[in-house]
Amino acid sequence: MNAIETLRPYARRIAARASKHYGLTCAELDRRYTLNQLQRCEAILNRHERSFRRFASILEFGCGAGRLVQCVADLAPQAAISGCDVEPEVIRQCRRRCPRGRFVVNHWAPPLDMADEAFDVVYSYSVFTHLSEPNHTAWLKELARLVRSGGLMLHTVHSYEYLRRTACFSPRSVDKYRLPGSIDAFLQSQRDYFYTVEDPAAPEYGHTIIHKEYVIARWPQATGLRLLDYVEGAIESYPEGCQDVVLLAKEAV
Protein backbone atom coordinates (compact mmCIF):
# COMPACT_ATOMS: atom_id res chain seq x y z
CA MET A 1 0.00 0.00 0.00
CA ASN A 2 1.45 3.40 -0.95
CA ALA A 3 1.63 6.50 1.21
CA ILE A 4 -1.44 8.18 -0.26
CA GLU A 5 -3.55 5.05 0.33
CA THR A 6 -2.58 4.96 4.01
CA LEU A 7 -3.64 8.53 4.76
CA ARG A 8 -6.79 9.40 6.65
CA PRO A 9 -9.90 10.28 4.57
CA TYR A 10 -9.44 14.01 5.14
CA ALA A 11 -5.87 13.76 3.86
CA ARG A 12 -7.14 11.97 0.77
CA ARG A 13 -9.50 14.90 0.17
CA ILE A 14 -6.53 17.27 0.36
CA ALA A 15 -4.73 15.11 -2.20
CA ALA A 16 -7.79 15.23 -4.47
CA ARG A 17 -7.90 19.03 -4.25
CA ALA A 18 -4.18 19.24 -5.07
CA SER A 19 -4.76 17.03 -8.08
CA LYS A 20 -7.61 19.26 -9.24
CA HIS A 21 -6.01 22.66 -8.66
CA TYR A 22 -2.33 21.96 -9.33
CA GLY A 23 -2.53 19.21 -11.92
CA LEU A 24 -0.75 16.66 -9.71
CA THR A 25 -1.71 13.00 -9.86
CA CYS A 26 -1.87 10.83 -6.75
CA ALA A 27 1.27 9.06 -7.99
CA GLU A 28 3.10 12.41 -8.20
CA LEU A 29 1.94 13.40 -4.72
CA ASP A 30 3.05 10.01 -3.42
CA ARG A 31 6.49 10.48 -4.96
CA ARG A 32 6.82 13.96 -3.41
CA TYR A 33 5.86 12.53 -0.01
CA THR A 34 8.47 9.79 -0.43
CA LEU A 35 11.22 12.12 -1.63
CA ASN A 36 10.65 14.42 1.36
CA GLN A 37 11.40 11.44 3.63
CA LEU A 38 14.38 10.35 1.56
CA GLN A 39 15.83 13.87 1.54
CA ARG A 40 15.92 13.88 5.33
CA CYS A 41 17.76 10.54 5.40
CA GLU A 42 20.19 11.76 2.74
CA ALA A 43 20.83 14.96 4.73
CA ILE A 44 21.72 12.91 7.82
CA LEU A 45 24.07 10.74 5.75
CA ASN A 46 25.66 13.88 4.33
CA ARG A 47 26.46 15.10 7.85
CA HIS A 48 28.82 12.13 8.04
CA GLU A 49 30.20 12.48 4.51
CA ARG A 50 28.05 9.62 3.21
CA SER A 51 25.40 9.48 0.50
CA PHE A 52 23.03 7.03 -1.13
CA ARG A 53 24.65 8.12 -4.39
CA ARG A 54 27.97 6.56 -3.36
CA PHE A 55 26.83 3.18 -2.02
CA ALA A 56 27.51 0.11 -4.16
CA SER A 57 24.97 -2.19 -2.46
CA ILE A 58 21.78 -1.22 -0.60
CA LEU A 59 19.20 -3.26 1.32
CA GLU A 60 15.80 -2.00 2.47
CA PHE A 61 14.45 -4.08 5.34
CA GLY A 62 10.66 -4.08 5.17
CA CYS A 63 10.52 -2.68 1.64
CA GLY A 64 6.76 -3.08 1.22
CA ALA A 65 5.58 -2.45 -2.33
CA GLY A 66 8.70 -0.44 -3.16
CA ARG A 67 7.60 3.10 -2.37
CA LEU A 68 10.97 4.13 -0.94
CA VAL A 69 13.30 1.70 -2.64
CA GLN A 70 12.14 2.80 -6.10
CA CYS A 71 13.29 6.35 -5.31
CA VAL A 72 16.52 5.05 -3.76
CA ALA A 73 17.19 3.10 -6.96
CA ASP A 74 16.69 6.28 -9.01
CA LEU A 75 19.00 8.21 -6.68
CA ALA A 76 21.69 5.48 -6.75
CA PRO A 77 21.76 4.04 -10.29
CA GLN A 78 25.21 2.60 -9.61
CA ALA A 79 24.03 0.47 -6.67
CA ALA A 80 22.87 -3.12 -6.46
CA ILE A 81 19.41 -2.78 -4.89
CA SER A 82 17.82 -5.39 -2.60
CA GLY A 83 14.78 -5.53 -0.37
CA CYS A 84 12.82 -7.92 1.83
CA ASP A 85 9.36 -8.03 3.38
CA VAL A 86 7.08 -10.56 5.08
CA GLU A 87 4.23 -10.12 2.58
CA PRO A 88 4.57 -12.06 -0.71
CA GLU A 89 2.12 -9.82 -2.55
CA VAL A 90 3.98 -6.60 -1.80
CA ILE A 91 7.23 -8.25 -2.88
CA ARG A 92 5.59 -9.03 -6.23
CA GLN A 93 4.58 -5.38 -6.50
CA CYS A 94 8.10 -4.31 -5.57
CA ARG A 95 9.59 -6.45 -8.34
CA ARG A 96 7.29 -4.79 -10.86
CA ARG A 97 8.03 -1.33 -9.51
CA CYS A 98 11.81 -1.74 -9.41
CA PRO A 99 12.71 -4.53 -11.86
CA ARG A 100 16.47 -4.14 -11.51
CA GLY A 101 16.36 -4.95 -7.78
CA ARG A 102 16.46 -8.28 -5.94
CA PHE A 103 13.49 -8.68 -3.60
CA VAL A 104 12.75 -11.63 -1.33
CA VAL A 105 10.14 -12.72 1.18
CA ASN A 106 11.38 -13.11 4.75
CA HIS A 107 9.85 -14.61 7.88
CA TRP A 108 8.71 -12.65 10.92
CA ALA A 109 11.94 -13.58 12.68
CA PRO A 110 15.56 -13.91 11.47
CA PRO A 111 17.58 -15.10 9.71
CA LEU A 112 17.66 -13.73 6.18
CA ASP A 113 19.08 -15.92 3.43
CA MET A 114 21.80 -13.39 2.64
CA ALA A 115 25.57 -13.46 2.94
CA ASP A 116 27.54 -11.82 5.74
CA GLU A 117 28.71 -8.26 5.06
CA ALA A 118 26.80 -8.05 1.77
CA PHE A 119 25.70 -4.39 1.92
CA ASP A 120 27.19 -0.91 2.23
CA VAL A 121 23.99 0.27 3.89
CA VAL A 122 20.94 -1.44 5.37
CA TYR A 123 17.99 0.85 6.04
CA SER A 124 14.35 0.67 7.07
CA TYR A 125 11.48 3.10 7.41
CA SER A 126 8.82 2.54 10.08
CA VAL A 127 9.64 -1.12 10.73
CA PHE A 128 11.10 -0.83 14.23
CA THR A 129 7.93 1.13 15.05
CA HIS A 130 6.04 -2.19 14.93
CA LEU A 131 8.22 -4.91 16.50
CA SER A 132 8.13 -6.57 19.90
CA GLU A 133 11.24 -6.03 22.00
CA PRO A 134 12.72 -9.56 21.58
CA ASN A 135 12.04 -9.52 17.84
CA HIS A 136 13.47 -6.03 17.40
CA THR A 137 16.69 -7.09 19.14
CA ALA A 138 16.96 -10.22 17.00
CA TRP A 139 16.52 -8.19 13.81
CA LEU A 140 19.08 -5.59 14.87
CA LYS A 141 21.65 -8.35 15.31
CA GLU A 142 20.72 -9.99 12.01
CA LEU A 143 20.84 -6.78 10.00
CA ALA A 144 24.19 -5.82 11.54
CA ARG A 145 25.53 -9.14 10.24
CA LEU A 146 24.74 -8.01 6.70
CA VAL A 147 26.62 -4.70 6.93
CA ARG A 148 30.08 -4.53 5.39
CA SER A 149 33.13 -3.29 7.24
CA GLY A 150 32.83 0.49 7.22
CA GLY A 151 29.14 0.26 6.26
CA LEU A 152 26.03 1.76 7.83
CA MET A 153 22.60 0.96 9.23
CA LEU A 154 19.87 3.62 9.15
CA HIS A 155 16.50 2.99 10.80
CA THR A 156 13.56 5.05 12.02
CA VAL A 157 11.73 4.73 15.34
CA HIS A 158 8.80 6.24 17.21
CA SER A 159 10.05 7.80 20.42
CA TYR A 160 8.48 10.02 23.06
CA GLU A 161 8.86 12.90 20.59
CA TYR A 162 6.49 11.04 18.26
CA LEU A 163 3.99 10.70 21.09
CA ARG A 164 4.20 14.38 22.03
CA ARG A 165 3.79 15.45 18.39
CA THR A 166 0.90 13.08 17.70
CA ALA A 167 -0.91 13.93 20.92
CA CYS A 168 -0.84 17.60 19.91
CA PHE A 169 -1.73 17.42 16.22
CA SER A 170 -3.57 14.11 15.66
CA PRO A 171 -4.57 12.64 19.05
CA ARG A 172 -6.80 9.96 17.52
CA SER A 173 -3.65 8.31 16.17
CA VAL A 174 -2.59 7.56 19.76
CA ASP A 175 -5.63 5.38 20.46
CA LYS A 176 -4.15 2.27 18.80
CA TYR A 177 -1.38 2.15 21.44
CA ARG A 178 -3.88 1.53 24.26
CA LEU A 179 -1.64 3.33 26.72
CA PRO A 180 -2.02 2.37 30.40
CA GLY A 181 -3.35 5.75 31.49
CA SER A 182 -3.07 9.27 30.16
CA ILE A 183 -0.49 10.43 27.63
CA ASP A 184 1.06 12.77 30.22
CA ALA A 185 1.36 9.92 32.72
CA PHE A 186 3.03 7.74 30.10
CA LEU A 187 5.51 10.49 29.19
CA GLN A 188 6.38 10.92 32.84
CA SER A 189 6.85 7.17 33.31
CA GLN A 190 9.97 7.14 31.09
CA ARG A 191 9.36 3.53 30.05
CA ASP A 192 12.20 2.15 27.96
CA TYR A 193 10.18 0.06 25.52
CA PHE A 194 6.43 -0.02 25.06
CA TYR A 195 4.74 -2.48 22.72
CA THR A 196 1.10 -3.34 22.11
CA VAL A 197 -0.12 -6.13 19.84
CA GLU A 198 -2.38 -5.10 16.99
CA ASP A 199 -3.68 -8.57 16.14
CA PRO A 200 -3.36 -11.48 18.63
CA ALA A 201 -2.99 -13.84 15.65
CA ALA A 202 0.26 -12.03 14.74
CA PRO A 203 1.85 -11.20 18.11
CA GLU A 204 5.17 -10.11 16.60
CA TYR A 205 3.59 -7.12 14.86
CA GLY A 206 1.99 -4.20 16.66
CA HIS A 207 2.79 -0.65 17.74
CA THR A 208 6.01 0.36 19.45
CA ILE A 209 7.36 3.40 21.28
CA ILE A 210 11.05 3.31 22.20
CA HIS A 211 12.72 5.77 24.54
CA LYS A 212 15.58 7.66 22.92
CA GLU A 213 17.99 6.73 25.72
CA TYR A 214 17.15 3.05 25.26
CA VAL A 215 18.21 3.25 21.61
CA ILE A 216 21.39 5.15 22.42
CA ALA A 217 22.42 2.62 25.08
CA ARG A 218 21.06 -0.69 23.77
CA TRP A 219 21.38 -0.59 20.00
CA PRO A 220 25.20 -0.40 19.94
CA GLN A 221 25.27 -3.28 22.43
CA ALA A 222 22.88 -5.40 20.36
CA THR A 223 24.59 -4.76 17.02
CA GLY A 224 28.25 -4.22 17.84
CA LEU A 225 28.01 -1.05 15.75
CA ARG A 226 28.90 2.51 16.72
CA LEU A 227 26.12 5.07 17.07
CA LEU A 228 26.89 7.89 14.62
CA ASP A 229 23.72 9.95 14.96
CA TYR A 230 20.31 10.11 16.55
CA VAL A 231 18.04 12.79 15.08
CA GLU A 232 14.85 13.28 17.04
CA GLY A 233 11.74 14.15 15.02
CA ALA A 234 13.78 14.01 11.82
CA ILE A 235 10.94 13.06 9.47
CA GLU A 236 7.49 14.62 9.68
CA SER A 237 4.75 12.08 8.95
CA TYR A 238 1.42 13.68 9.86
CA PRO A 239 -1.01 12.33 10.95
CA GLU A 240 1.45 9.80 12.40
CA GLY A 241 3.56 12.36 14.24
CA CYS A 242 7.20 12.03 13.29
CA GLN A 243 9.99 9.48 12.96
CA ASP A 244 13.40 9.69 14.63
CA VAL A 245 16.37 8.57 12.53
CA VAL A 246 19.10 6.36 13.98
CA LEU A 247 22.41 5.97 12.15
CA LEU A 248 24.99 3.32 13.12
CA ALA A 249 28.33 2.33 11.60
CA LYS A 250 30.36 -0.85 11.49
CA GLU A 251 34.01 -0.10 12.17
CA ALA A 252 36.31 -0.50 9.18
CA VAL A 253 38.89 -3.26 9.57
Image (cartoon, grey):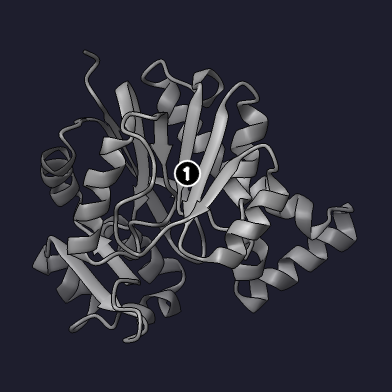
Q: Is residue 15 left or right of residue 184?
A: right
Question: Considering depth in this image, is 129 or 182 the residue closer to the camera?
Answer: 129
Residue at image point 29% right, 72% down: 204
- The C terminus, quarter of image: top left
253 over 181 or under it: above or below: above
Which residue position holds label 1? 60
Element under label 1?
strand
Amino acid at circle 1: Glu
Residue 75: % across, % down: 63, 29
Quarter occupied by the N terminus: bottom right
* Residue 118 drawn at (x, y percent): 39, 30
* Residue 112 place in picture, x, y as percent: 36, 49
Q: In this rendering, would 103 be left or right of 178?
A: right
Q: Is residue 223 above or below residue 45?
A: below
Could you say which is closer to the camera, residue 134 or residue 95? 95
Q: In percent of the image, x 63 and y 34: which residue is there? A: 73
Residue at x 65% of width, y 25% of height: 77
Classed neighbour count for the residue bearing mark 1: other residues with Cα under 10 Å, few (<14), some (14–19), many (≥20): many
